[in-house]
Amino acid sequence: MNQAVNKLSTEYQIARDPDGYLFDPLDWNEAVACQLAAEEGIELNEAHWPVLRYMRERWTTNRIAPDVRHVMEFLARELGIDKKAAKTHLYKLFPYGYVKQACKIAGMQRPRVWSTG
């Protein structure tokens, strides 16, 4: 199988698929997240980190990225808002979508099948 490998800057030699997702989520750290976010045109702030850390925690526990509905439930609990408002908040943080941006920045592998919420 011939797969292209994208590299982050020379400081971070991390293999990625042709769409920029990490091949190995264990290569992720917060500096990598900042660089991935910059590539997506996102400057991470204090509102992004709870989502990214929750996603990483779920991945560490289950070895699979959490579905968007779980992230929205987390945000609803965390912020004391309803699920509709949580969805709006999530898409303000990651305007091109959960899979396209949040999963990539959190160091997830590209999902094969996904509920986008």
Image (cartoon, rainbow, N blue to C red):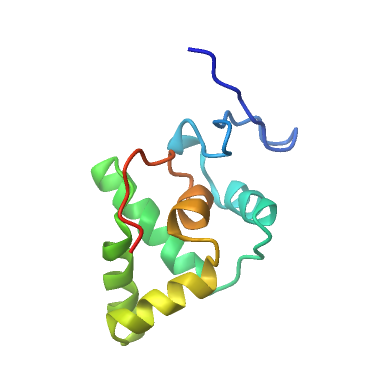
**Hey, which quadrant is residue 109 in on the image?**
top left
Residue at 39% x, 52% y is 56
Q: Position of residue 26 (x, y in %)?
A: 45, 36
Residue nearer the viewer, 114 or 60: 114
**Hey, which quadrant is residue 25 in on the image?**
top left
Residue at 53% x, 65% y is 94
| Labels in figure, total | 0
Q: Position of residue 50 (x, y in %)?
A: 43, 68
Residue nearer the viewer, 59 or 100: 100
Would you place residue 13 above or below residue 115 in this image?
Answer: above
Q: Position of residue 8 (x, y in %)?
A: 68, 37
Would you place residue 21 above or below residue 93 in this image?
Answer: above
19 with respect to 84 (left or right): right
Q: Position of residue 44 (x, y in %)?
A: 61, 65
Q: Tell me the quarter of the image containing the C terminus.
A: bottom left
Residue at 48% x, 61% y is 97
113 with respect to 28 (left or right): left
94 with respect to 109 (left or right): right
33 with respect to 43 (left or right): left
Would you place residue 49 above or below residue 36 in this image?
Answer: below
Residue placed furthest toward the right: 10
Residue placed furthest toward the top: 1
